Image (cartoon, rainbow, N blue to C red):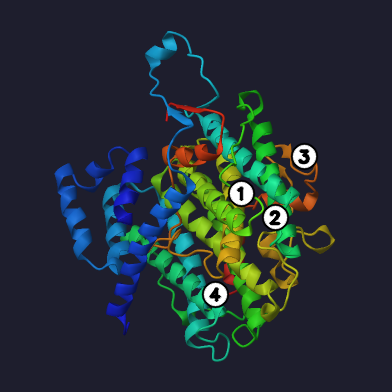
Amino acid sequence: MKNLQEQNTQVEQSVFTAQLQRRSFLQYAGAGAAGIALIAAGCKKRDRGIPEYEGVVLDFKDDFGVLNYAYALEQLEAAFYIQVASAPPSGFSAAEKAYFQDIQFHEIAHREYLKKALGAAAIGSLEVNFSSINFTDRTSVLATAKAFEDLGVAAYNGAGVRLTTDAYLVAAGKIVSVEARHAAYIRDLISNGSFANAEVVDANGLDVALTPDKVLPIAANYVKTKINVINL
Amino acid sequence: MNIVNIIEEIEKVDGEIYERLNPRRAAMKDFYSMGKKIALAAMPLAMGSMFKKAYGQSTPTAITDVLNFALTLEYLEYHFYNHSLLAAPGLLTPGTPAHGAITTIRDHELAHVNLLKGALGGAAGKVYAYADFDFTAKGTFPTVYTDYKTFLAVAQAFEDTGVRAYKGQATVLKGNAVLTTALQIHSVEARHASHIRQMRAAPAGGGVAIKPWISLGAGGGANDSGVPQVDPVYAGEALDVQTGVTITGIATGVTKAAAVESFDEPLAKADVLTIASLFIK
């Protein structure tokens, strides 16, 4: 390759930019972990009886914990898009309104699917807190949508390895690629061509994968209900 | 540095990764300092050889097979895009958003080739060159490198196939650190697919009535691409029952189309290889 040295420099720069941008994305999405409690639960605690938690509990001891984690994130996304679709920002084009309707129904379908798959094991409904979002402003809505979609992709990518049931692993795989399609579409609305830029794809061509302990503090900025995590 | 993050991630599921990589944990420091020195472009290979060292001896054949299957698809995608940029005069104009997007995608496919090749090491299969492929699919798409709309239609088929192919292998990789890497490639392919679909929907791409996500095809069929020649790429995509749960009507407004769009379906390895074989000489 003739410009190998030059290419290396470019790759290097993009990697550093990616890290900086990713950091600023995290800052954007959340300033703290106010609504989330990480609880180190051991067997002994269980022996003494399961403590009563305020809010919901994500128990990562089995696949239901992972599915509930996904259910919590889908509840958040669905609530956001329902609000956007019911009263889109005045800056939205007809095509954008139609696609945000679509996305709304996708997230509702994901939420309801997970609820049914979980059955009696499903956590309750989360109360959201969207006070930081200006729903009348196109820029604010798109920035939030981008943050939610990229976070959703990273969350599913990071949680897949925890799943032990083939059917649930495949179901999660079926959902995550749709979230990635959303993410790319919304990114392109903000800046055409940013569908898979260095903010989200590294020098190895890999998307972001985040573990629940990284994802939940960000999500918690938009959730009033306390989310308790055990057996992570 | 990304590589360090990856190893830290693996450590969460495989606490012995450092031991596997090197019996002496302290020796990992060598790697950290090496990472700063060597060119980042060489990182996939360095990482690949590390995985080889960690899992190489005991990598089950099933996992090696998945990686080689993925490698073949990545070669196909890489050469398809690379040729469009280097040797298809008039197809993509440098400086345009289309040229930029295809360059981004080509670079990702090359990164995937290098990552998989490195991970496989000596177990890596055939090295495919451009000359090994026939992107007209034996005459089905004769204008693939002269007509922008045809080029995008084929690109969409490749990206949507790629998404389905990785998804189809998830259960083989279940619980393995390799699954996370595969998922990280899988969602990048989905981002590509979304963008290519948007390029087709734009006036220059033909103004095709197509969404960034796979919807229900005309007449309720599984193929929403408007290109009947790629029916096998979308076979089974019209499914609306997931693990026994019917998605259509699961809530108000969730139509069959919405249900189909909400879940991307996997494709079995044999079916993917049948599609790929149309483009391999």
Left or right of B118: which side holds A26? Answer: right
C-alpha distance separating marks 2 and 4: 39 Å
C-alpha distance separating marks 4 and 3: 44 Å
Work out whether B118 lies above or below A177: below
Q: Are marks 4 and 3 on the same chain?
A: yes
Q: Are marks 3 and 1 on the same chain?
A: no
- Name the residue at the bottom extreme: B89
Q: Are marks 3 and 1 in contact (CB under 8 Å)?
A: no
Mark 4 vs mark 3: which is more N-terminal? 3
Can residue B193 be seen in the rendering of this structure? Answer: no
Amino acid at circle 1: Lys
Determine whether the residue tagged by mark 4 lies in a helix, strand or loop: loop
**Which residue is labeled 1 in the image?**
A174
Q: Are marks 4 and 1 on the same chain?
A: no
Residue at 74%, 42% in the rendered image: B247
Foreground tag (2 vs 3): 2
C-alpha distance separating marks 1 and 2: 20 Å
Chain at tag 1: A
- Name the residue at the right extreme: B219
Position of residue B271 measured from the top left corner of the image (x, y, whole percent):
62, 60
Work out whether B182 lies above or below A118: below
